[in-house]
Image: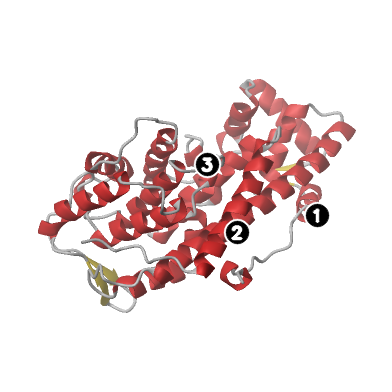
Amino acid sequence: MLFKTQELERKEIEVIALIDELKSKLSYALRQPTRWLGILRRSTFAKALRGSNSIEGYIVSPDDALAAAQKEEPLDEKTEAWLAVNCYREAMTYVLQLAGDPYFRYSTDLLKSLHYMMLQYNLSKGPGQWRPGYIAVRDEEKNEVMYEGPDADHVPTLMDELIESLNTDDGKVHAMVRGAMGHLNLVMIHPFRDGNGRMARCLQTLILTKTTGTLAPEFCSIEEYLGHNTREYYDVLQGTSGKAWNPKGDTRRWIQFCLTAHYRQAMTLLKRTKEMQRLWEMLESEVKKKGLHERTMMALMDAAIGYKVRNPTYRSAAEISDQVASRDLKELVTHGLLLPTGVKRGRFYTASELIKHIRESTREPRGIADPFGLSS
């Protein structure tokens, strides 16, 4: 027996309608011909990678998350956190590719394969295999068990039931709710020795990418939001099941939490599209004023949104040689648009005060309302 979807009440149906309307606006904004879409796409992917892994304590810098998203070497040393994020990138990239597969079906083998991709950096954690025995989630600060998964003997049957439910889509349950329930059931079954939270969030994203409508799959994930709201995320999960496997628990609060995440993530992305458009226009004006090549916009945009610009990253984005990239970056420094730090291979560039000022002038108002407070 799995956790069941609560019958939606009017307020949940109204919030889903609000989110669908928001995502339609976002989809329309992202379909317009823009030269900054690729920058937003990889930045959004990097934030999702960083957010999901930060929940498990694997913390990397925004720059290293971006490097992982682009299959580049990290700025910092290759720590276990970097390996975790890099392997998660592999799994998530595969998930995004599956979005366009017309013959796709869920299977336990698929989930085991995704799990192996995520945890292949540490074979002692049994990547790709169901856990062999008892498992519990502990709060190390309080030194107490927060949750105990079902008996290991029940895992194969429960996972088969989950797969069957995922492959049975009568269209009556909205994709956001299906994703939330897939996430909930996997994390509560806790089928693996480690990496269950990451797998549950990855599964939720997979469910969403298969039913995205017109919104590109890269913009469907709520992992960035969950990474910023980890405490509430854990509290809602525990409140749904209690301290042990209890599929009779009320799932309404969990569904509402996930819908709130979707609303706020969509609002955040919609704001970013407006900011990116204004930022591009203002930086483009500076580039033209100083007689710089248009391709230097790639470096300026990255610096403006807070990333450290490196020669390899810039030359890959602009599709130019190492020599041309070095010359461009030097010109951006000469014109007071970038600031250099370090030497040789360790050299990177950050936004000058002028670029930071331009970035600040493009920001949308902060704060996003609770969608359940907006519904009538």
Residue assigned mark 3: 213
Q: Amino acid at mark 3?
A: Gly
Question: Where's residue 31, x and y in %?
Answer: 65, 36
CA separation in Å, label 1 and label 3: 34 Å
For residue 216, the mark is: none
What residue sits 50% from the left and 41% below the top?
A: 217
Q: Amino acid at mark 1?
A: Ser
Mark 2 nearby-residue class (10 Å; few <14, some 14–19, many ≥20): some
Q: Amino acid at mark 2?
A: Leu
CA separation in Å, label 1 and label 2: 29 Å
CA separation in Å, label 3 and label 2: 15 Å
Question: Where's residue 237, x and y in %?
Answer: 36, 68
Q: Is residue 245 above or below residue 281?
A: below
Q: Nearer the viewer, mark 1 or mark 3?
A: 3
Mark 1 nearby-residue class (10 Å; few <14, some 14–19, many ≥20): few
What residue sits 69% from the left and 22% below the top?
A: 324
- Whether residue 350 appears in this view of the structure is no
Question: Where's residue 158, x and y in %?
Answer: 19, 55
In this view of the protein, which residue sits in the foreground, 8 or 44? Answer: 8
Which mark is first along the chain, 3 or 1?
A: 3
Asked whether the residues under the numbered discs 1 and 2 touch, taking CB atoms below 8 Å apart as contact, a structural biologist would say: no
Q: Quadrant of residue 37?
A: top right
What residue sits 37% from the left and 42% below the top?
A: 87
Q: Quadrant of residue 268?
A: bottom right
Which mark is first along the chain, 2 or 1?
A: 2
Q: Quadrant of the N terminus?
A: bottom left
What residue sits 50% from the left and 43% below the top?
A: 212
Question: Where's residue 124, x and y in %?
Answer: 20, 48
In this view of the protein, which residue sits in the foreground, 262 or 114? Answer: 262
Q: Is residue 156 left or right of residue 69?
A: left
Q: Is residue 309 above or below residue 205?
A: above
Residue assigned mark 2: 18
